[in-house]
Amino acid sequence: MAENVLVVHGGGPTAVINSSLYGVIEEARESGRIDKVYGAIGGSEGILRERFMDLLKFPEEKLKLLLETPATSIGSSRYALEQKDYEAMVDIFKKHEIQYVLLNGGNGTMDTCGRIYEACKGEGIRVVGIPKTIDNDIAITDHTPGYGSAARYIAGTTAEVGVDVKSLPIHVCILEAMGRNAGWITAASALARKQPGDAPHLIYLPERPFHEDEFLEDVKRLYEEKGGVVVVVSEGLKNELGEPVVPPIFKTERATYYGDVGAFLAELVIRKLGIKARSEKPGICGRASIPWQSPVDRDEAILAGREALKAAMEGKSGVMVGFIRDVEKEEAGGVYQMRVETIPIKEVMMYERTIPASYINQRGNDVTDEFIRWCRPLIGPELRDFIDFKEEYEKR
Amino acid sequence: MAENVLVVHGGGPTAVINSSLYGVIEEARESGRIDKVYGAIGGSEGILRERFMDLLKFPEEKLKLLLETPATSIGSSRYALEQKDYEAMVDIFKKHEIQYVLLNGGNGTMDTCGRIYEACKGEGIRVVGIPKTIDNDIAITDHTPGYGSAARYIAGTTAEVGVDVKSLPIHVCILEAMGRNAGWITAASALARKQPGDAPHLIYLPERPFHEDEFLEDVKRLYEEKGGVVVVVSEGLKNELGEPVVPPIFKTERATYYGDVGAFLAELVIRKLGIKARSEKPGICGRASIPWQSPVDRDEAILAGREALKAAMEGKSGVMVGFIRDVEKEEAGGVYQMRVETIPIKEVMMYERTIPASYINQRGNDVTDEFIRWCRPLIGPELRDFIDFKEEYEKR
């Protein structure tokens, strides 16, 4: 019987999902065991519709493009699976001689992964999860592929915006970062700093209730000191009641819509402090950015794909590939210490991991050095150096 | 007597202003004539405060950082000059033995350049303008340094966002581009396309009155066809009366504030069409982006700096360095045809150049091939290729 693999993508894009797919294909090729690596075209819905395409047949030259193609090359879906769908999948897998099912996604996808695993138990089909999310909110694993690149994007972009704002320091610039419930991306903006006083000057995370008065106080003080202030905020900032800080702008039958936090806070600065302000919201420009892809993140994404297939071929099922760090050893030796392990999928299913208290400063307007040490290796090489003759002039 | 140069930066940042400064320094060094290349620290205000720093004394290694430092390394200002300031400047130039004054900026700065030139007439001080603006709205010159990089940023980013939206095609994504009165940057998003059907699917420019009903009609049609739609809009869209399409959100004594056009249009799509929509506004992240710097733009920025100093040393004054293109010759020979000329500053002062009608399609929701041919050489090398297995699957 043929040994076939099926790769399924779930949820929102990152800059390195396709790198994990590349890792699976390379591992399959090198194993000498695998006949076909099917991509499910259009996510879990693609499984039910049996939209499978063998990716092993593509030349290496074409497959290499996966490493620099953002989002998912095989497509994803938001289709809500029902119990009967899971049962139907087992027959579909058998029909196509698929022994290894690899699901690549975030928390929602890991939940699906667990359910498919349950449905496939005793059928000789192994189901393994490959973590992926810019939000970095999957449990147990130290971090997730996709995060390092989103972190590098926000750090590099904040550094560039910082130079822009400093060159004509007459306003407050609010940069809105993705991550509705978890502030991992927003926090990574701190990696922009090379010297004391560098942007970002303030960081607000959804893990801490947002106090408008403290925010205005902080902004005013920094504006008086610097003239140009860069603030990075999470799109999901909430007040003490856990409600979004932006009042709802309108409702439809299905959902309530809120304005952009960045725009809201910029308006607040203008209105309440009389200081010029503007906001930027790169949004999905960030998660899709290939120039800011972190090489470390990309390598780890490839590795996660490879290790998922390896685990499945070794007979593991109902597990997710995870990254385990030894930060203490890193601090002693100065070298990034990461190893891959498989984690029972039940332990990660539908648990949203947010930033621990030790990574946030007391006032809740910045991150701690502990966070920076944790995050630093993930974004890859040092950001470029800039030259500031204004500063050289002041130093004379 | 010493021969000294003064470089002054005006107005808003681009990704290559510092490259023009680098060009001036290199030209000065190579000429063997120049004693000092002063940077005015903090723009025209820096002249009056005599905040001058000799940049020739810095090592080449440090100066090279100028090529990859966004915004201005010597600072800019928004100080409003008065007639007495121009007169004071002449004495300051003489005191510091400055024979060559080079002003780098957009339309406002070229106006200042003309006035300084008038004040310096007959004093043996030559005044030359170096164009610079992401907005590309300076008259006569074919394009301005700074534009090519802003164009490359929006083209590359639109291509990446296009892939993101296509991978899970369930919404309309509105990307807001800079350029309040001139749509040059917005238009350049069209360079993202490699194949028919690629993003951007719609482009709206401030040069054409925006019709809400036509916009909704276009979006609806494309959404039904594709599922995922990418629209690029200028931040300065206006209706038939010339008023911003976004209603004012509040007023202060000094100014009226409008919301973001992208957010406004996304809301319109949700409300009126019931289609999921979101907006992104990279804003100054775009003009400060070094990874998206166009190598052509950077080289031309260096050249503009060099040529400005050359012109001044040759005795020219009251001129701006401009780029002259021969697009007909380009089309015949397939090679970019650009030469540098000096343009009398009086001809460019305070005239805002917008997109000509021949660059906009009839319905006003896209650019023409003529625009694409004009813009293509400015953004530099081909954008990277992506791989789309969904498309390969459909093609089988």
Image: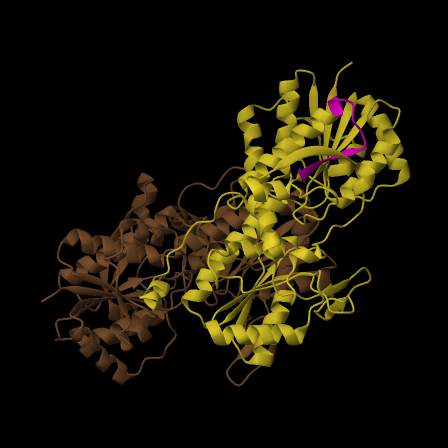
Chain colours: A brown, B yellow
Q: Is residue A15 visible?
A: yes
**The N terminus of chain A appears in which quarter of the rendering?**
bottom left
Residue placed furthest toward the top: B1
Relative to A127, A49 lies left or right: right
Residue placed furthest toward the left: A1
Residue placed furthest toward the front: B332
Q: Quadrant of residue A121?
A: bottom left
Taking depth in this image into account, of A160 and B30 the one nearest to the observer is B30
Q: Does the stretch in magenta take in B162?
A: no
Residue B9 versus residue A260 in the image, above or below: above
Residue B228 versus residue B159 in the image, above or below: below
Residue B222 placement (x, y as % from top left): 52, 72
Q: Quadrant of residue B378?
A: top right
Taking depth in this image into account, of A320 and B211 the one nearest to the observer is B211
Residue A4 versus residue A197 in the image, above or below: below
Q: Is residue A119 visible?
A: no
Residue B148 placement (x, y as % from top left): 59, 45
Residue A89 placement (x, y as % from top left): 23, 77
Q: Quadrant of residue B44?
A: top right
- Residue at 87% in and 23% down: B123
Q: Which residues are magenta?
A: B312-324
